[in-house]
Each structure stands twice: as C-alpha cells, then as structure tokens.
Amino acid sequence: GLRSVLGTLAAEAVTDFDFSRTPPGALQPRVKRSEPKMVLNGIDVLVREHFIRLRGRKIGLITNHSGQDRDRNSLIDLLHNAPGVGLKALFAPEHGIRGAVDAHVSDSVDEKTGLPIYSLYSNPPKRLPGQSDADFDMAAIRSRAPQPHQMKDIDTLIFDIQDISARFYTYSATLGAAIEAAARAGKKIIVLDRVNPVSGKFEGPVQTRHYSFIGFHNIPVRHGMTFGELARMFNEERQFGADLEVVRIEGWNRDMWFDETGLPWSHPSPNIRSLNAATLYTGICLLESTKVSMGRGTDAPFEIFGAPFIDDVRFAWEMNRANLPGVSFIPIRFTPAKGHKLGGVECGGVHCIVTDRKALNSVDIGIVAAQVLYRLYPNDFDIDKMQRLLGHDETLQAIKDGKSLEEIKKIWAPALEEFARRREKFLLYK
C-alpha cells in the first residue's frame, strides 16, 4: 500500500546521505564532486623553497595584483621581506601595479615598500616623420620595456602576471619586451609561471600582420600556452638570447580549467571579472575597436556586447541560428556607465551564455558576430577597425566577401597546424 511505497522511498533517500559526516540533528547530502587539485603556481614553488634560489640577487619585479600566492600574499611583500633577497624596483604593466587603472600608467612610488614603480604602459613615443607602421609599433613595444637606467641597480628581472590566453592581452607583449630588454642589458630574467585559466586549447588565425603591443608574436588569437612556455618561444623564435629561467607550475595539465586548480581567483584586469568572461574574451574582444561596446561600464563586461544600432532580438536570433557549440545568446538592452565607450547610450545586444566550455570555440563568436553585423549594418559597424586585433587580413577580407565560418576556418588551418608543431618544443606541461 501507500505506507510501503513511502517506506521504500524513505529508505532510498537515506542512501543519499552520509551520516558519518553529519552533526546531530542534521542530514547532509553526499557531495560527489572530486576534490580540487593542489596546483602550485611558480610563486608557490618559490614560497615552499623559502626563496633560496633568489638569495643574493638584486631584483626588479614586473607584476601586478595577480602576482599572489595560494594564500593571497602579494609577491611584492613576500620578496620585500624575504631574507637575503634585494628587491630594488617594481615595474607596472597595463592597469598598474595594483591592477585598478583602466588608462595609461605613470611612474610612482609604492606606498607600502617605498620602492620606485616604473610604468611599462605609458604613452607611446611620438611618431617620426616617414616612420612605417611596423617600425612605430616596434618603437612603442620597446618604450614599454624596462629601460637600462631603470635596471642599473639590479641583476635579475622577475615576471609574475596572470594571463588569459589571448594574443592581444597586453601582458604577453610586456613579457616579450622584458625578455628582449633583459637580454640587451645582460640581466637574468625569471618567469614565475601561472596556469592558463581557460585550459590549453588554441584556436583562431595565426597573426600575419607586423608585431605590435596587441600582437607581440605570430601566434593564434587564443594561444593555449602558459607565460613560461610563451617566454621560451619568444626567446628562441625572436632570437633574443636572454638568460631565461622558468619556475614551473606543479600539478597542472593542459585540460584543466582555473576552477579545477584550487587556486584563488582575482580579476586579471578590471574588466575580466569571472572565468566566464575570460573564456569569452578571445572572441568578443575581436570587436573591441569597432563601434560595438564590449559591456565595459556594466556588471558583465566581455559577457555582453552590443551597440545603439543593433536590434537585439534580431541579432540574438542570427547568432543562435549559427548553432555555435557550447554557447547560446539572449537578446538584451544595456547602457554602459558614463566614462566608458558608448557611456550613457542604450545599446541593443546579446548576453553570451556558456553551456559547454570544452566544446566552445570562443573565437568563432567574434567571427560570426562580425559576419552578422557587417551583413545587417555595414555602414554602422566599421569592420575595418577589426584589423589589428584580428591580426589576419585574409580573414577580414573573407568576412567582407560573405564567406562561411567553415570556409574562413579552412583559411586558418595550415598555419594553425604549423603553430601546433612550432609550440611543441616549448611546452612544459602535458
């Protein structure tokens, strides 16, 4: 009867609870999720070693707020207090030493340690008469590297910044410029490696345009490497010849995402506020230089994007019609805060919902969005502004010519396969 059925259901329900871990008077469901891995970034390895390998060194530190250990201790403070380690100068990348500035950064002094902070993201030099784009961009890169007079009292540069696997994320250019500067000045450079938060997957066109601060090397839009691995690639393929050492990560593999590492999250930059945003960034940011807002000045930058000229319902329908794996699109309207791009102006756009991050090809989002916007709003979109971030003129022309996503990806394929072979010798993790 009913009583026996209820008794059977109750007995089955009890099997879902673990009484051995249950305080008196409470029932707690078993959690069938595996424990997070104990992953150690390079900084954590140094802490475990009590900074022995740095003793006697005079150090210039390139870092920001993301340079922290598993217990959220700042590398600045750790090195400043480490016995026998001479921390002499700090170097600040884009967004500043504390990661809070969304503009060019000036030289300053660190209030806590009293050390000088040299900006590696100041205004670029003035363009010389007749200077080519390539020469000007190279001059800009080198102007944002540690300068010889700033390194006169040090013998070692240390680099520790969190990356998010995007070619145009400027921290990789800061890394490359620092390696070249260290080589030219005869200084050792040590990279404290950090996990790639969005796994080791790589995708998108390999850059064919000249080097710039948003495209330091010929790698895909999403490179799938760690900064330690990129440092090895830059040093050899650009023939810098620096005395480079990488303090390796322990416990990480290329299939792991940040939330599987057990490491604490901090926003890598002011507008990357979640792992979702980092996952989507390599696709959505391809539109950054066009007349489209990336959601800066809202609560969800790089998870939403749009513009005043976009019909959000039509746009979402077109994006969903593309059937991109691992993502769906919700029509929204949003107004960025004043002081940001399109601040105070209502925009139509989409909210990107990641449904399967392993299946998602984030770069495809940017390509399909460009295809749709160029077809629907050719006079408003300003597609040519995608050139520098895309880094691949043939892809841009294919979008203009109405090529399908599949046709466009066939254009990338040979160089992407070659990149897979190129990077193999520089990989440190399986």
Image (tube, rainbow, N blue to C red):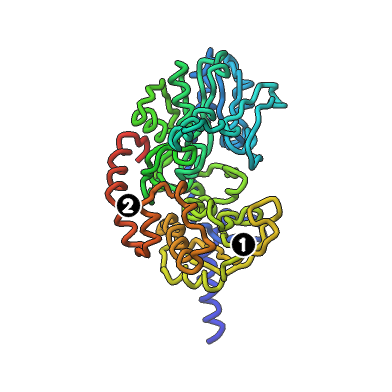
Q: Position of residue 148 (x, y in %)?
A: 53, 18
Q: Nearer the viewer, mark 1 or mark 2?
A: 2
Q: Residue 120: which quarter of the image?
A: top right
Q: Position of residue 233 (x, y in %)?
A: 37, 33
The amino acid sitting under disc 1 is Leu
- State the CA–CA distance, disc 1 to disc 2: 55 Å
Which residue is found at the position 45% from the left and 16% from the top? 186
Q: Position of residue 81 (x, y in %)?
A: 63, 21
Q: Identify which residue, 378 or 254, lies in the foreground.
A: 378
The amino acid sitting under disc 2 is Trp
Looking at the image, which residue sits at the far front? 129
How packed is label 1: few (under 14 Cα within 10 Å), some, or many (20 or more)?
some
Tag 1 secondary structure: loop
Which residue is found at the position 55% from the left and 28% from the top? 62
- Residue 88 lies, with reference to residue 110, above or below; the image says above
Q: Is residue 342 left or right of residue 35?
A: right
Looking at the image, which residue sits at the far bottom? 1
Q: Identify which residue, 375 or 322, lies in the foreground.
A: 375
Tag 2 secondary structure: helix
| Residue occupied by mark 1 | 27
The answer to whether residue 51 shows anywhere in this view is yes
Which residue is found at the position 61% from the left and 38% from the top? 95
Which residue is found at the position 70% from the left and 21% from the top? 114
How packed is label 2: few (under 14 Cα within 10 Å), some, or many (20 or more)?
some
Which badge, 1 or 2, is on the more N-terminal residue? 1
User: Which part of the image, by quadrant, shows the C terminus?
Assistant: top left
The answer to whether residue 44 shows anywhere in this view is no
| Residue occupied by mark 2 | 412
Q: Identify which residue, 382 or 168, lies in the foreground.
A: 382
